[in-house]
């Protein structure tokens, strides 16, 4: 039975992926920002365990994990959690940059660092759920895109560093997907939100599962997923 640690499993892509893995009998370790959220996740996915730590404070993750029991085995680490705060560079305060860089980039780097010994032991897989903004930046998306461009660089570096240890690394770049984050983006853009216009989170979960299930003779390094016609 494979063991997967997922951040952002409470909604959207993370929830879709967790549900698919849970249904096929894999073991889930779900990250939660606090104890209340952890209880909700266990209720949603019976049999799952949780790790609690605030991704907005990546410098405290090592301390938080040291107070909890890590799984004995870890086959994959899937970084899904993220935050977005739109605004022109001329208008964004440092706090908006700092919060997005913390959650979207520094926390994944720190969680990866802390869990690499387990992933090396199992010749595991790290998946970074990035964004189309990790490949191209547009007006009002500067801070978010910077965090996601950094996430691509992180994934590329870890892939090169850990290849000899048998750790596979995949970056997934979904286009606009029907998630609570997308609803927030539309509110910030002042637009009406119609979820039917965007990618279903289940489709992104299928892409992630394809990368995770690929035989060991190959590695899916980068996967772009765009809305269909």
Image (cartoon, grey):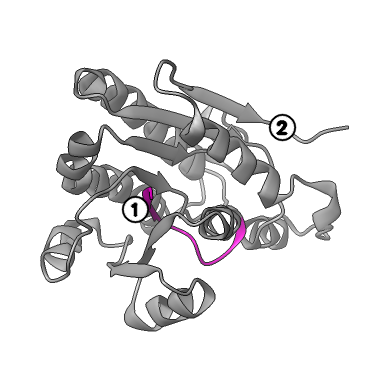
**Count of marks, rendered view:** 2
Residue occupied by mark 2: 226
Q: Callout 2 environment at 10 Å: few (<14), some (14 to 19), or many (20+)?
A: some
Note whether 110 is above or below 130 in the view shown: below
Is 208 or 228 nearer to us in this picture? Answer: 208
Q: Is residue 4 magenta?
A: yes
User: Any mark on residue 98, and which?
Assistant: 1
Residue 95 image position (x, y, % from top left)? 37, 58
Residue lying at the far right of the rendered structure: 229
Q: Which label is found at residue 196? A: none
- Relative to 208, say whether 95 is above or below: below
Considering only vertical position in the picture, is 85 above or below 159?
below
Does residue 110 appear in this view?
yes
In terms of image quadrants, where is residue 199? top right
Q: From where the camera sits, is residue 131 visible?
A: no
Q: Nearer the viewer, mark 2 or mark 1?
A: 2
Question: What crowding class fits label 1: few (fewer than 14 Cα within 10 Å), some (14-19), or many (20 or more)?
Answer: some
């Amino acid at each position: 039975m494979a063991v997967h640690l997922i951040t952002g499993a409470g909604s959207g892509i993370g929830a879709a992926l967790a549900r698919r893995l849970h249904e096929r009998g894999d073991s889930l370790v779900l990250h939660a920002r606090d104890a209340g959220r952890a209880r909700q996740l266990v209720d949603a996915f019976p049999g799952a365990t949780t790790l609690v730590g605030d991704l907005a404070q990546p410098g405290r993750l090592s301390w938080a994990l040291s107070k909890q029991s890590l799984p004995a085995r870890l086959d994959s680490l899937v970084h899904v959690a993220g935050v977005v705060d739109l605004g022109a560079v001329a208008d964004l305060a440092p706090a908006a940059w700092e919060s997005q860089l913390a959650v979207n980039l520094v926390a994944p780097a720190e969680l990866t660092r802390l869990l690499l010994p387990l992933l090396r032991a199992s010749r595991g897989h790290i998946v970074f759920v990035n964004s189309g903004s990790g490949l191209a930046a547009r007006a009002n998306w500067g801070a978010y895109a910077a965090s996601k461009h950094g996430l691509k660089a992180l994934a590329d570096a870890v892939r090169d560093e850990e290849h000899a240890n048998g750790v596979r690394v995949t970056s997934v770049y979904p286009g606009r997907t029907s998630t609570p984050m997308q609803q927030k983006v539309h509110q910030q853009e002042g637009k009406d939100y119609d979820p039917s216009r965007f990618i279903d989170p289940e489709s992104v979960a299928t892409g992630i599962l394809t990368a995770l299930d690929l035989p060991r003779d190959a590695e899916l390094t980068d996967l772009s997923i765009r809305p269909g016609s």
